[in-house]
Amino acid sequence: HAATWNTLTGEAPVVVAHRGASGYLPEETLGSYELAIQLGADYIEPDVQMTSDGELVAMHDATLTRTTNVADLFAPRNDGYRVGDFTLAEIKQLTVKPTGALSRPDSTYPGFTPSMADPYTVPTLDEVLGFLKDFNTANGTSVGVYPESKHPFDSEKNGKIIASLKNNGFTAAADKVILQSFAHQTISDLTSLLDTNGMEAEVAQLGSVRLEDGVYGVNGTDGFNTLETIAGVATGVGVGYTGITEAFIQAAHGFGLTVHAYTFRPQTEEEAFSMIQPLLDWGLDGFFTDYTDLGRTVVDAQ
Ligand code: G3P
Ligand code: CA
């Protein structure tokens, strides 16, 4: 084991289960989140979309087609299958399909039996948080949650994310919440909503690493922001791993920002080490992976 980590806090880097154990099971489902926890996730990641009746669901895409059987059950609306054109009751009728590179068509993972009745339907954010809170309470664990407020910027949606966290008892630093968005406007909004509600959570600006006029920053969906600007409203950055350098990590750490990398999709243990290890040596604070077990193995080997 390494004597010290080069992370901002000196603690071990965190393994984030990107959309759950999405490399193996249908993404963003309770079954996928449960397997991710069993495989050693420090955080589970739900992306957040809003239904036509204003409910929050765990879903990456703005449309239902890639991950569910919606086209078998419903005709298209407004020429498509946008999440925002369907009610929660309708979305609850859908089954989520396995899409990961190492997933099986029958949605099984060797040795894993989901504990819930419908492991591969679309959960609400409330259901994800309720599941996690119950799991942590029953097992004495402290697995965290890393919700992403998906575009477009919508303060109503952000308010509902904060309310859901509050209602499910995720209000203090010990509850391990990291909020994330590609939109700087959403980051500012989430930070002020946390303040207003007296809640403690980390907040991460997503985007790609960029050096502009010799100054490091992150390019999100609403443009470039310097690390200094980001540090005014966020606690960390989440950036595409291919753009990360040691100098970027050191610059971010200099502003008190953690650096998390997305998204590692190694298919073997050997590949996991070669992809992730160099960034851990540089002081990476955490990373998103579809293959929780492979990420865990790399961190635990240090
Ligand atoms: O939040 C990090 C990562 O999840 C961003 O990519 O497209 O999978 O949400 P995406
Ligand atoms: Ca995400």
Image (spheres, rainbow, N blue to C red):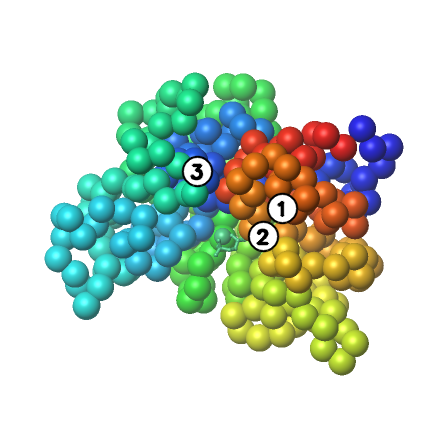
The CA distance from mark 1 to mark 2 is: 6 Å
* Picture disc at residue 102: 3
> Could you say whether the residue bearing mark 3 is in a helix, strand or loop?
loop
Disc 2: CA contacts within 10 A as few (<14), some (14-19) or many (>=20): many
Closer-to-camera residue (140/110) = 110
**Tag nearer the camera, 3 or 2:** 3
> Image point 37% across, 56% down: which residue?
61
- Viewed as shown, does residue 27 lie left or right of 242? left
Residues marked 1 and 2 touching at CB (< 8 Å): yes
* Residue 219 sits above or below residue 89 on the image: below
Q: Residue 147: give x, y in percent of width and height.
A: 50, 48
Task: Pick whichever, 195 or 287, lies toward us.
Answer: 287
Q: The disc labelled 2 sits on which kind of residue? A: Tyr
User: Relative to 62, is 201 above or below?
Assistant: above
Apparent side of residue 59 relative to residue 10 in the rendered image (left or right): left
Residue occupied by mark 1: 287
Residue occupying the point 19% across, 68% down: 78
Q: Amino acid at mark 1?
A: Phe
Q: CA distance from mark 3 to mark 2?
A: 18 Å
**Residue 189, x across and y down, in percent:** 54, 63
Nearest the eye: 127 or 111 = 111
CA gap, disc 3 to disc 1? 19 Å
Image height check: is 138 above or below 15? Answer: above
Residue matched to label 2: 262
Mark earlier in primary sequence (1, 2): 2
Of the image marks 3 and 2, the number of the one nearer the N terminus: 3
Residue drawn at x 32%, y 48% as measured from the top left: 67
User: If the image is split into quadrants, where does the C terminus sit?
Assistant: top right
- In the image, 127 versus 289, the foreground residue is 289
